[in-house]
Image (cartoon, rainbow, N blue to C red):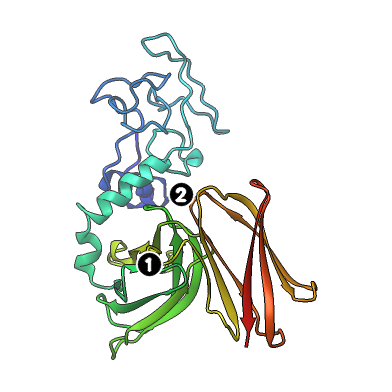
Amino acid sequence: MVATGISACLVGGYTLAHEIGHFYGLPHTHEVFSGEELVDGSNCLTAGDGFCDTPADPDLSGFVSRTCNYTGSFRDRNGDTYMPDVSNIMSYSDPSCQNKFSLDQLALVRAVHENENSFVLESCNIYPDFKATSNSNSSKLRFDELISIEYEFENIGIQEDYEVPVFIYLSDKAGQIGSIVKRDTINFFSLASNEPKTYNFKLPSNSGKKQFITLSIDPNSEFIETKKRNNLITDEFIVDNSSLENVLIFPNPSSGVVKLFLRDSNLSGQVTISLYDLGGRLHKTINSFKTNQEFFTELDLSDLREGLYLIEANFEKSDEQMIFKVYKQ
């Protein structure tokens, strides 16, 4: 039998955590309302507690030792011996052994908390609620253009001063958070609204046709908030180079960075970009990779003397070479 009363709730925190689990929709691991869960897990979604990452449980009351070993010998209707998890908080294991929820259990807690039980935080009105909205300069851009996004940050919860970290990620796949391209800190003030903040991003070499910029407020969940769903915002951009010729080097002449763009599906694989002066002296080398789609790279000429230079692009896979003339002014 599970202990009840205030004192029982406070001893080890077991009963309190167990009952909070029920409050957020978690059944016992030995639940049989929808049927007995089989040890092989074949009906884990429709029987037992409905979670496939909690092993079938025959009801552990009195069958867990003080050293946290299952001492029962029960079998399911297939004749398989139970191998329950004695550490799960929603079981009837020995309280000294219980210390975790499973990932699927935690996912349900999060979903119930943000929907059915959201009134718990909202009615208390003692927590902040950080929110971001965005306004990008364009949803379509060329490979060498900057992505510029203006964000508006707002705290719509309790008004106090907060310094909150913000991470911005870049990905070329929808639904993936990607890699961090910017870290910042946003100051939320109790007596003033935040001004808009603009971030500019440069696309990586040979980026895909679509790019996704995702901003996350408080990415490591350092703050308790009324809602977390409005902490994440994603903008989608389409890389459109249709206005460019198939082979292009620009600007030419150049006083600084020169850009090389190629659109040739027959050229792919490892590519070596070399910069020579007219005397044959090698000044710069870039090793890169070209897919069968578009390719671009940049060379910085700012440290070179004025004059004419040759750029060679050697494609290892096709054993082909392309040569371009560029003038440093």
* Residue at mark 1: 243
Q: Is residue 310 left or right of residue 88?
A: right
| Amino acid found under the numbered disc labelled 2 | Gly
Judge depth for marks 2 and 1 and give the one in front: 1
Q: Earlier in the sequence, mark 2 or mark 1?
A: 2
User: At 43% across and 28% down in the image, what residue appears?
Assistant: 55
Find the distance from the CA under tag 2 to the CA under tag 1: 67 Å
| Residue 262 percent location from the top left of the image | 52, 61
| Residue 160 percent location from the top left of the image | 33, 83
Residue 37, by quadrant, is top left
Q: Is residue 70 left or right of residue 278?
A: left
Q: Is residue 303 left or right of residue 296?
A: right
15 or 238, which lies in front?
238
Examine the rendering and report whether any part of residue 5 can be seen. no
In which quadrant is the C terminus drawn?
bottom right
145 or 271, which lies in front?
271
In which quadrant is the N terminus drawn?
top left
Where residue 9 is drawn, which disc sits there? none
Q: Is residue 146 above or below residue 44?
A: below
166 or 227, which lies in front?
166
| Amino acid found under the numbered disc labelled 1 | Ser
Q: Is residue 61 left or right of residue 319?
A: left
Examine the rendering and report whether any part of residue 291 can be seen. yes
Mark 2: few/some/many CA within 10 Å (<14, 14-19, 20+): few
| Residue 314 percent location from the top left of the image | 67, 57
User: At 50% across and 39% down in the image, what residue appears?
Assistant: 97
| Residue 34 percent location from the top left of the image | 24, 24
Q: Secondary structure at mark 2?
A: loop
Q: Secondary structure at mark 1?
A: loop
* Residue at mark 2: 12
